[in-house]
């Protein structure tokens, strides 16, 4: 294995871990960040108050942070 290939291994591992974490994204994060759905729209879709949707999004963010912390 060349020195360049060895140097790239840790970075490749980070990329793999990030993709694995993205694959575990809670649906709320996908709706908010990828689909750009507003909190009000999410609340309507989930049949909950806007405050509850905000709380669940906050919890989903915290969970995602835990997945990324080890990277």
Image: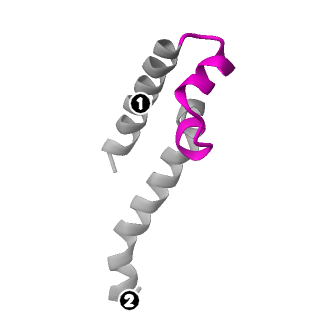
Residue at (52%, 16%) from the top-left corner?
Answer: 50
How crowded is the residue under tag 2: few (<14 C-alpha within 10 Å), some, or many (20+)? few
The answer to whether 17 is drawn above or below residue 6 in the figure is above
Residue 37 part of the magenta segment = yes
Residue at (60%, 25%) from the top-left corner?
Answer: 42
Quarter-wise, where is residue 41 in the image?
Answer: top right
Q: Are marks 2 and 1 in contact (CB under 8 Å)?
A: no
Q: Quadrant of the N terminus?
A: bottom left
| Residue identifier under label 1 | 63
Q: Secondary structure at mark 1?
A: helix
| Residue identifier under label 2 | 2
Q: Is residue 7 left or right of residue 17?
A: left
| Mark earlier in primary sequence (2, 1) | 2
Residue 14 percent coordinates (x, y): 39, 59
Distance between the Cα atoms at labels 2 and 1? Answer: 38 Å
Residue 62 percent coordinates (x, y): 37, 30
């Amino acid at each position: 294995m060349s020195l360049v290939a060895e140097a790239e291994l840790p970075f490749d591992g980070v990329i793999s871990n990030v993709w694995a974490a993205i694959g575990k994204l809670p649906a709320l994060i996908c709706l908010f960040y990828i689909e750009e759905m507003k909190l009000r729209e999410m609340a309507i879709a989930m049949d909950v108050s806007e405050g509850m949707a905000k709380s669940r999004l906050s919890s989903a963010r915290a969970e995602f942070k835990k997945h990324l912390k080890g990277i």
